[in-house]
Image: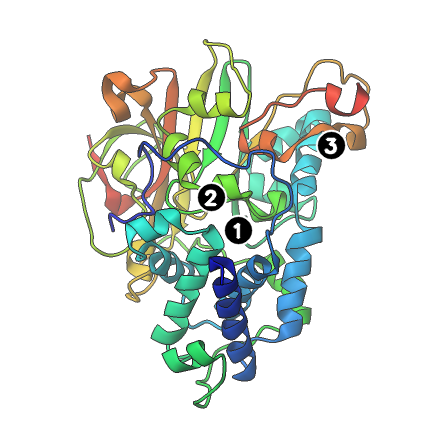
Amino acid sequence: MSHLSDVELRVRALESVLVEKGYVEPATIDAIVQTYESEIGPKNGAAVVARSWLDPQFAAWLKRDATAAIASLGFSGRGGEHMVACFNTPEEHNLVVCTLCSCYPWPVLGLPPTWYKSPPYRSRAVMDPRGVLAEFGVALPAETRIRIWDSTSEMRYLVIPMRPAGTEGWSEAELAAIVTRDSMIGTAVVTAEAVRA
Amino acid sequence: MNGGQDLGGMMGLGPIQGIDERGVFHGRWESRVLAINVAVGAAGCWNIDMSRHAREAIPPAEYMTSKYYVIWLKALERLTVEKGLLTADELELGKALTPPRPVKTVMKAADVAPSLARGWPADRPAASEPLFAPGDAVRMKNMHPSGHTRLPRYVRGRLGTVKRVHGFHVFPDSNAAGKGEDPHWLYCVSFNGRELWGADGDPATDVSVDAWEPYLERA
């Protein structure tokens, strides 16, 4: 038997006995899975970014009190109780990591990708960020400083990427569509080509 | 603790895998582990810091080679037994052999959306004035507790600058040990790449961590 089937059996045993003893309900488990599979994900963060690109007052609020500004768009709660927005500029690029576990802003990005939780990313993001970015195909100008946020508390960090040239006059929905998950972690930059090319 | 979870600055772990991967779960079992963790966590038998400590207590070689949801599974197995929800035999069999213990809450499907939207804030009413302010030079304590801490090894003993005061937050070192929330001021402290890694560091990078007041000394 493969290692995976052993794990699957253990998960099944854990769930059955927790349900049998009345600590958890199967419908609750299903509802949580459904929430993170299809309801809470990076489209939430993309909406925050697009709004901040179009509305300077919202961007200022996001800088001052990200938790409240993000909650005004309907995104709040578990894994994002205390938010900070990190704005990329030509002078400074932001990159988010959790070297100690997998802290990630769930309400705006959903669950983290496997690589974000993996030892290679967690070990090197703080020591060799340019090398990490190169693996993602991102080469920043040498004069751009990199600011790495190690998520060691319940504060959660959302990178606000720079709005790309060539998007003048785009609608909020069109802008949101080019904002990728990785650009809000800091391992990608946003380009206009994605949907309009 | 200086466990396998404290990965900042480690070398030899290879290239980052799965950069183009899509989808949040790989197999149904991962989604069940995630959801069981959220649902049984709401029962109130342990807190998030106890969960993190249960994960980092996995021996380093095992931690670093386990899939992330397997780390969560192992921590759940340990906590459910440690906190008296299940016995080891029940886990093994997947069948109840003893009556359940009382728990604070059993999460209903209808509670999922409101309770996730509310979350579990970690800030508490301030009981003191912060000792440090943005711009202050601080040194991280050189400390090596055998219990849970959120001060990564790579910043211990290092000189940094307070960037912001986040608020008055639950102190994980105490909360994980079941010694109460013992809230303290939480700061964002930034370090230059050269301070952290010496001549091998990039002076055009700064790394910040969130650090509670007991981790800091005035520099």
Residue at point 39%, 51% (across, down): B169
- The x and y percentages for residue B67 are 46, 51
Tag 3 secondary structure: helix
- In the rendered structure, are the residues bearing label 1 and label 2 in contact, judged by CB atoms less than 8 Å apart? no
Q: Residue A117 carries which label?
A: 2
Task: Identify the chain of the residue marked 1, using the numbered disc in the image.
Answer: A
Say whether disc 3 or disc 1 marks the residue closer to the N-terminus.
Answer: 1
- The x and y percentages for residue A157 are 51, 38
- The x and y percentages for residue A98 are 42, 41
Q: In this view, does A72 lie above or below B124?
A: above
Pointers 3 and 1 within a single chain = yes
- In the rendered structure, are the residues bearing label 3 and label 1 in contact, judged by CB atoms less than 8 Å apart? no
Task: Identify the chain of the residue marked 2, using the numbered disc in the image.
Answer: A
Pointers 1 and 2 within a single chain = yes
- In the rendered structure, are the residues bearing label 2 and label 3 in contact, judged by CB atoms less than 8 Å apart? no
Q: Residue A176 carries which label?
A: 3
Mark 2 vs mark 3, CA separation in Å: 25 Å
Residue at point 71%, 32% (across, down): A51
Question: In the rendered image, which residue does mark 1 sit on?
Answer: A79
Name the mark nearer the viewer: 1 or 2: 2
Which quadrant: the C terminus of chain B? top left
What's the residue type where badge 1 is placed?
Gly
Q: Is residue A83 above or below residue A129?
A: below
Q: Looking at the image, how many numbered discs can be counted on the residues?
A: 3
Quarter of the image where one finds residue A173: top right
